[in-house]
Amino acid sequence: MDPASGPKDPKARREDLKKLRQKSEVVKVVDKNIKRLVSDMFDIMHADNGIGLSAPQIGVSKRVIIGEYESTKTPVPRMVLINPEITWTSKKETVDEEGCLSFPNLYGMVKRPERIRYTAMNENGKKIEGKATGLQARVIQHEIDHLDGILFIDRLEGNLYTYEKQAENGE
C-alpha cells in the first residue's frame, strides 16, 4: 500500500493478519508521503489511546514506528523512528503487560530487555542514535517486532487475557 493512499484502522481483521506477519520495507527517502504517514499515525494512535504504533498496523509496509505517552509516572517522549535497529540490549529482562492496537482488549505478559540502544532516522531523514529504558524501551521493541512480522502474542509468558469493559452508566 502506498502511504499516500491513506491509513487503515489498526484493529486486525483476519485478512490483515497475513500482512502483519510480513517483514516491512526499508524507507529509502523521507519525503512528504512519509511525513504524512507519520502525522496520520499519531492521529490514529492518539484516537485509539495507544502509546505506540507501527506503519504495518495501518496497512503500510514501511519500517516506521512512533510512540508517545504523557504520564507523570512512566512517560514515553514523542518519538518517530524510521528504519530503526536495536544495536544493544541489556542482559536484565523484565516481564510486563503488553497489549496492541491491532488486538483490542487482549493483553499478556511479555519478557523483554529492560534497556536498549538503537539507531534510526528521524522524521527529517537525519540519522539518530538513542537509548531507552523501561516503558520506552518496551514500546520500541514491541513496534520493531511489528516491522519484522512478529506479534506480542508470539512472545507471551503465559496466557492472553482481557479486561471487562465498564458499562456506560457505571454499572
Image: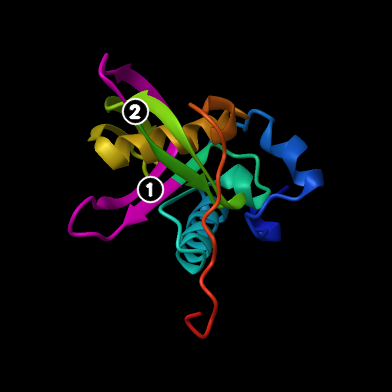
Residue 165 position in % (x across, y down):
54, 66
Looking at the picture, tell me which residue is in the foreground, 158 or 5: 158
Quadrant of the rendered image containing residue 141: top left
Q: Amino acid at mark 2?
A: Thr
Instruction: Look at the image and say whether residue 64 sits in the magenta stretch.
Output: no
Q: Can you name the residue that lies furthest to the right here?
A: 15
Residue 25 vs 54, above or below: the answer is above
Dot 2, crowdedness within 10 Å: few (<14), some or many (≥20)? some
Helix, strand or loop at disc 2?
Answer: strand
How far apart, in angstroms, are the residues tagged by discs 1 and 2?
14 Å
Residue 92 position in % (x across, y down):
25, 18
Instruction: Look at the image and say whether residue 80 sits in the magenta stretch.
Output: yes
Q: Residue at x 23, y 50 (%)?
A: 74
Q: Amino acid at mark 1?
A: Asn
Quadrant of the rendered image containing residue 27: top right
* First of labels 1, 2 by sequence position: 2
Q: Residue at x 38, y 48 (%)?
A: 124
Dot 1, crowdedness within 10 Å: few (<14), some or many (≥20)? some
Q: Name the side, left or right, on which 82 lies relative to 5.
A: left
Q: Work out whether residue 38 can be spotted.
A: yes
Looking at the picture, tell me which residue is in the foreground, 121 or 41: 41
Q: Work out whether residue 30 can be spotted.
A: no
Residue 13 position in % (x across, y down):
75, 50
Q: Which residues are magenta?
A: 66-94
Quadrant of the rendered image containing residue 19: top right
Residue to which mark 2 is pinned: 119
Residue to which mark 1 is pinned: 124
Q: Can you name the residue that lies furthest to the front here?
A: 171
